[in-house]
Amino acid sequence: MSPEHEEAIESVAIVARLLDRASLRYHQTRSDLTGAFLASGALLASEHALWLLPGGSDPSAGPTPVAQDPVELVRAAEAVLDQLPGRAYTLVPGLAGLVADVCGLLRDCQAT
């Protein structure tokens, strides 16, 4: 695996951790239907990121995000994806779909 591919995979793992934490924080801080919707969206996007990781990857191997605000966690996930070079999209099939998931989730987060 090339260094670029390893970096892309690590970025996807970071995104998975950020989105998983965002889902947890939505469950902890919002008891309304909108909170449940956003928590589910974050969890689905996290699962999408995990699905993109190669077999044997351990996404929990990195640091656990400590941020408390779920919107900030989703923004951080978007920022990680924004920093990936264009070549990452050929190295990690399905990455464009994850970006679309995160952008849609961020749009929904900001609308509430």
Image (spheres, rainbow, N blue to C red):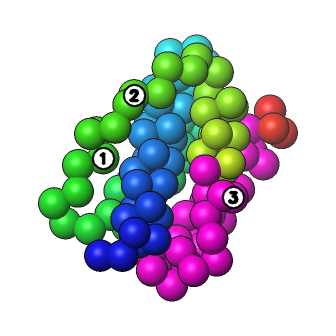
Residue type highlighted by circle 2: Thr
**In the rendered structure, are the residues bearing label 3 and label 1 in contact, judged by CB atoms less than 8 Å apart?**
no
Magenta stretch bounds: 80-109
Q: Is residue 78 magenta?
A: no
Question: Is residue 30 shown above or below 4?
Answer: above
Q: State how far apart marks 2 and 1 are (Cα).
A: 10 Å
Q: Mark 2: which secondary structure?
A: loop
- x and y percent of residue 96 in the render? 59, 73
Q: Who's the residue at 45% across and 45% down the image?
A: 14
Q: State how far apart marks 3 and 1 are (Cα).
A: 19 Å
Judging by the rendered image, the residue that carries numbered circle 3 is: 82
Q: Quadrant of the C terminus?
A: top right
- Relative placement, left or right, of 78 versus 44 is right
The secondary structure that dominates the magenta segment is helix
Q: Residues within 10 Å of mark 2 (few under 14, many from 20)?
A: few
**In the rendered structure, are the residues bearing label 3 and label 2 in contact, judged by CB atoms less than 8 Å apart?**
no
Q: Mark 3: which secondary structure?
A: helix
When asked about the image quadrant of residue 35, the answer is top right
Q: Residue furthest right?
A: 111
Q: What numbered label is drawn on residue 64?
A: 2
- Earlier sequence position, callout 3 versus callout 2: 2
Q: What numbered label is drawn on residue 29?
A: none
Judging by the rendered image, the residue that carries numbered circle 1 is: 59
Q: Is residue 86 magenta?
A: yes
User: For this rendering, which residue is in front, 28 or 5?
Assistant: 5
